[in-house]
Image (cartoon, rainbow, N blue to C red):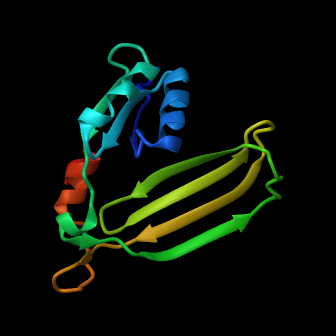
Amino acid sequence: MALRQITVFGGSGFVGRSIVQALAREGYLVRVAVRRIGLANGVKAFGDVGQITLMQANLRMRESGYGWPIVDLRLKYVRPALFNRPLVVRAEIVEWENRLKFEYVIRDKATGEKVNTAMSIQVAVDLATREMQYVCPRILWERLGVSA
């Protein structure tokens, strides 16, 4: 069986903790990207020993020198999301070389029925020059843990 590994940004926050816990229950190896590792150690208790690891990923825009405005956002309505019904949102980074492209699938938790699909695109803008970057900055690649 293929190794199932995923990185969760914001995994020590209120919503993120629930996501990390659910992924661990499903058997994923979970990397949790956090600003301050010392404040997020409790997240490791949601999985088996070594199943959940923390990684420093302080992606604060000003400190990185880049802004990431959303330049395209699309949402496709499939069926209504009913009031007081929990939803499951799956967000996946599908492009990171020239832009950040996220794809989302939103499902009704109880039935698994698809409610919406969505996509967003963000581009890097150099905060000093205000110029759009046509290749994502190396700092993003380093933070995502991918090779250039």
The x and y percentages for residue 39 are 30, 36
Q: State the residue lying farthest toward the front.
A: 39
Tell whether 50 sits left or right of 28.
left
Name the quarter where the C terminus is drawn.
bottom left
The x and y percentages for residue 111 are 81, 38
Q: Residue at x 32, y 42 (%)?
A: 33
The x and y percentages for residue 136 are 25, 67
Q: Residue at x 20, y 51 (%)?
A: 142
Tell whether 32 sits left or right of 116.
left
Using the rendered view, name the quadrant where residue 129 is placed.
bottom left
In-front residue for pair 111/44: 44
Q: State the residue lying farthest toward the top.
A: 49
The x and y percentages for residue 53 are 31, 28
The answer to whether 2 is drawn above or below residue 84 in the figure is: above
Q: Residue at x 42, y 40 (%)?
A: 11
In-front residue for pair 18/48: 18
Tell whether 39 sits left or right of 43.
left
Tell whether 33 sits left or right of 108.
left
The answer to whether 135 is drawn above or below residue 140 in the figure is: below
